[in-house]
Image (cartoon, helix red, strand yellow):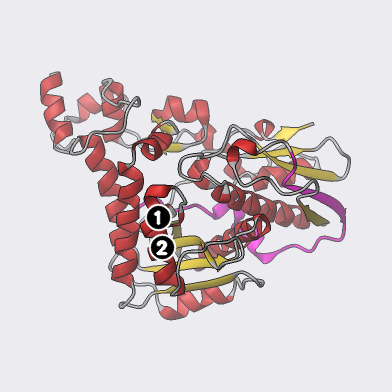
């Protein structure tokens, strides 16, 4: 295909006119992720050490931008010390590290569940050397948690869902509403411990405003150059890049792979408004927002400990959603705390809590805000780095 013709196709936002032979020549037919990049979802195959087996399950935890920011120190016998990888943070969209620490909470919860499945109980001591500072630039090597192992773990029924839990990053089926009784099951089977609270809605009245909030806040992240570039720099396109990195935002769709194969996927600047890449990104978030069939949220104070506890609760809620056959996908833009998002940060607190955005760490904060719905087809797993990348021995 001539370059000029391809640009017209890309500018129109479709590859429908491209021949199958052209796409195959670019290596862009199979949209699946490389199997090797998904090995973590098979569980700890061949691992016999109790702690390494537990960490192998924990690295499947949900986390912002799929950064996988965990370091598990196993150098002390009978202990797992959890630290943050300082290179795996999001200074633009998550300037205070709140979402990163929610991901650590999810890791801890899966770790504790995986230990219990092996008959091992655990004592979780958060911040043994004090909390991480507020500013990311001041973060250091101090541990997030020290987990001490002891006999007596009791298996958790939700553990059966750990390797089945995948986050649906696709449009939901608008012909299949989420029944109020199903929402009640989801919220009731994952009760929060004070001071955290869970809530949600599938009622027709609130949904339009919440969908609009999702779409408008997503546009802010996409149209703010430095926040958009943070995502672009973490985007992995095609099997080779996905397998090389096994983290970040993996894209294996024919359209984006074709654009990348022809050298037209520019990662040096945000996509120009009106360009094919711009419309592709906008269309994806618009679809996610428009097809939300309900929302669930977690609220509570905003101390470092509350952020960790939010992550522990959130992953349990997503495991429960998996058991119930409901898709659950964070729409995190409105709860991000960079300056341009401030109006939407205020709005999400008004819509969810009926009060202004928090001014102190003790004020009620919307910690997690997720759309729910039913998915048509299989939800793919997200790539994970090899276990050895997370473990210090």
Q: Is residue 251 visible?
A: no
Asked if the residue under mark 2 is in contact with the one under mark 1, i.e. CB atoms within 8 Å, the reply is yes
- Give me the C-alpha separation between circle 1 and circle 2: 6 Å
Up-down relation of residue 76 to residue 357 (above or below): above
Identity of the residue drawn at 66% across and 45% down: 133
Outermost residue to the front: 359
**Viewer-proximal residue among 333 and 381:** 333
Q: Which residue is mark 1?
A: 342
Identify the secondary structure beneath mark 1: helix
Identity of the residue drawn at 11% across and 21% down: 4
Query: Image quadrant for the N terminus?
Result: top left
Please state the extent of the stretch shown in magenta in the rendering. Answer: 142-171
Identity of the residue drawn at 80% across and 46% down: 129
**Magenta span includes 229:** no
Q: Residues within 10 Å of mark 2 (few under 14, many from 20)?
A: some
Outermost residue to the bottom: 181
Instruction: Place residue 75 in its image quadrant.
Output: top right
Answer left or right for 190 relative to 116.
Answer: left
Q: Which residue is mark 2?
A: 346
Residue 187's x, y, as percent?
54, 74
Query: Image quadrant for the C terminus?
Result: top right
Identity of the residue drawn at 44% across and 38% down: 249
**Viewer-proximal residue among 387 and 98:** 98
Q: Residues within 10 Å of mark 1 (few under 14, many from 20)?
A: some
Answer left or right for 51 relative to 322.
Answer: right
Answer left or right for 360 relative to 224.
Answer: right
């Amino acid at each position: 295909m001539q370059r000029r013709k391809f640009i017209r196709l890309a500018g129109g936002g479709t590859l429908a006119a491209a021949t199958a032979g052209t796409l195959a020549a670019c290596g862009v037919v199979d949209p699946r992720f490389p199997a090797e990049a998904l090995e973590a979802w098979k569980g700890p195959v061949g691992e016999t050490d109790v702690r390494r087996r537990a960490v192998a399950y924990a690295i499947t935890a949900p986390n912002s931008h799929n950064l996988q920011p965990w370091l598990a120190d196993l150098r002390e016998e009978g202990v797992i010390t959890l630290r943050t990888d300082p290179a795996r943070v999001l200074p633009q969209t998550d300037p205070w590290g709140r979402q990163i620490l929610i991901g650590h909470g999810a890791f801890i919860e899966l770790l504790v569940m995986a230990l219990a499945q092996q008959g091992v109980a655990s004592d979780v001591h958060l911040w043994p050397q004090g909390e991480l500072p507020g500013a990311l630039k001041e973060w250091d090597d101090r541990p997030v948690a020290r987990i001490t192992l002891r006999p007596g773990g009791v298996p958790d029924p939700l553990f059966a869902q750990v390797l089945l839990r995948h986050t649906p990053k696709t449009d939901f089926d608008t012909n299949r509403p989420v029944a109020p009784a199903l929402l009640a099951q989801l919220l009731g089977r994952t009760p929060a411990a004070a001071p955290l609270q869970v809530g949600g809605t599938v009622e027709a009245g609130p949904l339009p405003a919440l969908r609009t909030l999702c779409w408008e806040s997503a546009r802010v992240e996409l149209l703010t150059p430095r926040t958009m570039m943070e995502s672009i720099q973490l985007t992995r396109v095609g099997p080779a890049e996905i397998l090389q990195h096994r983290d970040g935002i993996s894209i294996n769709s024919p359209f984006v792979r074709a654009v990348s194969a022809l050298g037209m996927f520019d990662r040096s600047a945000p996509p120009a408004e009106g360009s094919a890449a711009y419309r592709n990104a906008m269309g994806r978030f618009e679809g996610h927002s428009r097809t939300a069939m309900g929302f669930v949220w977690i609220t509570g104070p905003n101390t470092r400990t509350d952020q960790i506890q939010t992550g522990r609760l959130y992953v349990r809620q997503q495991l429960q959603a998996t058991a119930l056959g409901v898709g659950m996908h964070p729409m995190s833009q409105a709860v991000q705390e960079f300056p341009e998002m401030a109006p939407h940060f205020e709005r999400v607190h008004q819509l969810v809590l009926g009060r202004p955005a928090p001014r102190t760490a003790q004020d009620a904060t919307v910690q997690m805000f997720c759309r729910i719905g039913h998915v048509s087809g299989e939800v793919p797993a997200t790539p994970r780095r090899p276990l050895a990348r997370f473990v210090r021995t």
